[in-house]
Image (cartoon, rainbow, N blue to C red):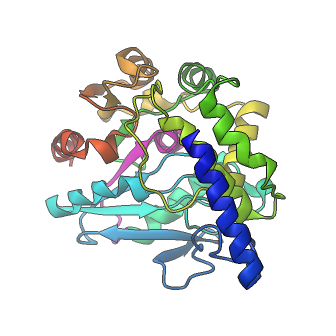
């Protein structure tokens, strides 16, 4: 009920402001933050014919740790704690994936898994200062799925990998995780509140601001009280990418995917992290994913859930640092 009251109040403010200042909800910056194509002051890189919101921390000649955020369609803001690794001799790179966060928006038909892998290749090449510079991938949720996809396609390009609760390395595992974690009760108050605004705000596929705004509101169900992923509450973000999310949902449903076919070729030890409070993931699911690799270790992060990197970074940090220092 509190969320519904907040939505009504917010809509009233928008309507009042639009009457006074003729506010256009499609005008960049009015509903959600501007992307890099709309705000030149944002840190960005141009790769693979798209402009990505991106930045790095640390000595550019040090081994690269590239962080891949969750989603699809989220951004790296709640993963910025990872930049602490820059104080330990690593060059830490963040980027909002194509069509996500503050990166450039594209039409739905453009998106594909291979395109995202190509983007990652270009990000690596952009930040790499020498051919011998090591590259480690650190993925969370959807980002961890992308790490698996990249290693599966290019097992010789990556020197180590960290998986923080990947949603599933193939369609079967994704369905299993989704069924356990995000199945909605369409008669619950939380669900009703989250979709109440749909009566007032609509958006066409080209109206990215409206759709991204709607996704930001509807995503609040993920941290509702009693959620199965053990998420403590909201974590910060800049902007969601609704079209990117919609595109990859359709790809998964229509085409399926399997990022496990070549993982057995990857001999380097990989690290799996899972949160104690995420009843949808747990040790059993981590073991299923780790089993695709010849060498792996699994570590439980206590007293947290799926958003461990934001809420319990102090517990995640020493585990990640020890792993990186061991194989660097």
Q: Nearer the viewer, residue 27 or 259?
A: 27
Quadrant placement of the N terminus: top right
Q: Position of residue 118 (x, y in %)?
A: 59, 57
Give the residue displayed 31% in from the left and 35% down from the top: 268
Q: How many marks?
A: 0
Q: Is residue 160 visible?
A: no
With 82 as the anchor, is 39 left or right in this view? right
Give the residue displayed 48% in from the left and 79% down from the top: 42
Q: Position of residue 308 (x, y in %)?
A: 33, 39
Q: From what the image shows, is residue 206 above or below residue 282?
A: below
With 196 as the anchor, is 180 left or right in this view? left
Q: Quadrant of residue 17?
A: bottom right
Q: Is residue 317 visible?
A: yes
Residue found at the very far right of the displayed protein: 204
Q: From what the image shows, is residue 13 above or below residue 160?
A: below
With 5 as the anchor, is 253 left or right in this view? right
Q: Position of residue 252 (x, y in %)?
A: 70, 34
Instruction: Give the magenta-colored segment's residue range.
Output: 128-154
Q: Position of residue 171 (x, y in %)?
A: 64, 26
Q: From what the image shows, is residue 103 above or below residue 202?
A: below
- Residue 123 highlighted magenta (yes or no): no
Q: Nearer the viewer, residue 244 or 203?
A: 203
Q: Quadrant of residue 94?
A: bottom left
Give the residue displayed 72% in from the left and 48% down from the top: 197
């Amino acid at each position: 009920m509190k969320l519904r009251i907040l939505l009504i109040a917010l809509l009233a403010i928008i309507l009042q402001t639009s009457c006074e200042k003729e506010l256009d909800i499609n005008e960049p910056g009015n509903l959600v933050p501007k992307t890099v194509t709309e705000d030149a002051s944002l840190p960005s890189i141009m790769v693979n014919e798209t402009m990505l919101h991106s930045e790095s921390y640390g000595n550019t000649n040090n081994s690269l740790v590239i962080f891949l955020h969750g989603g699809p369609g989220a951004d790296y803001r709640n993963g910025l704690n990872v930049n602490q690794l820059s104080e330990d001799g690593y060059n830490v790179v963040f980027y909002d994936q194509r069509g996500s966060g503050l990166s450039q928006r594209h039409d739905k038909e453009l998106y594909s898994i291979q395109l995202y892998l190509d983007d990652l290749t270009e990000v690596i090449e952009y930040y790499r200062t020498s051919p011998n510079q090591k590259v480690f991938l650190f993925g969370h949720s959807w980002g961890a799925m992308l790490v698996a996809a990249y290693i599966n396609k290019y097992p010789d390009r990556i020197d180590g990998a960290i998986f923080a609760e990947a949603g599933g390395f193939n369609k079967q595992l994704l369905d299993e995780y989704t069924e356990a974690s995000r199945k909605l009760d369409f008669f619950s108050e939380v669900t009703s509140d989250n979709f109440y605004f749909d009566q007032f705000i609509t958006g066409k596929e080209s109206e990215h601001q409206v759709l991204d705004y709607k996704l930001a509101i509807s995503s609040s169900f993920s941290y509702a009280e009693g959620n199965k992923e053990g998420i403590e509450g909201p974590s910060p973000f800049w902007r969601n990418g609704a079209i990117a999310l919609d595109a990859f949902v359709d790809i998964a449903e229509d085409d399926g995917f399997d990022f496990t076919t070549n993982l057995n070729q990857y001999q380097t030890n990989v690290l799996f992290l899972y949160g104690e409070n995420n009843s949808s993931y747990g040790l059993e699911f981590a073991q299923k994913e780790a089993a695709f690799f010849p060498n792996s270790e699994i570590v439980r992060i206590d007293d947290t859930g799926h958003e461990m990197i934001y809420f319990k970074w102090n517990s995640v940090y020493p585990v990640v640092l020890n792993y990186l220092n061991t194989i660097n």
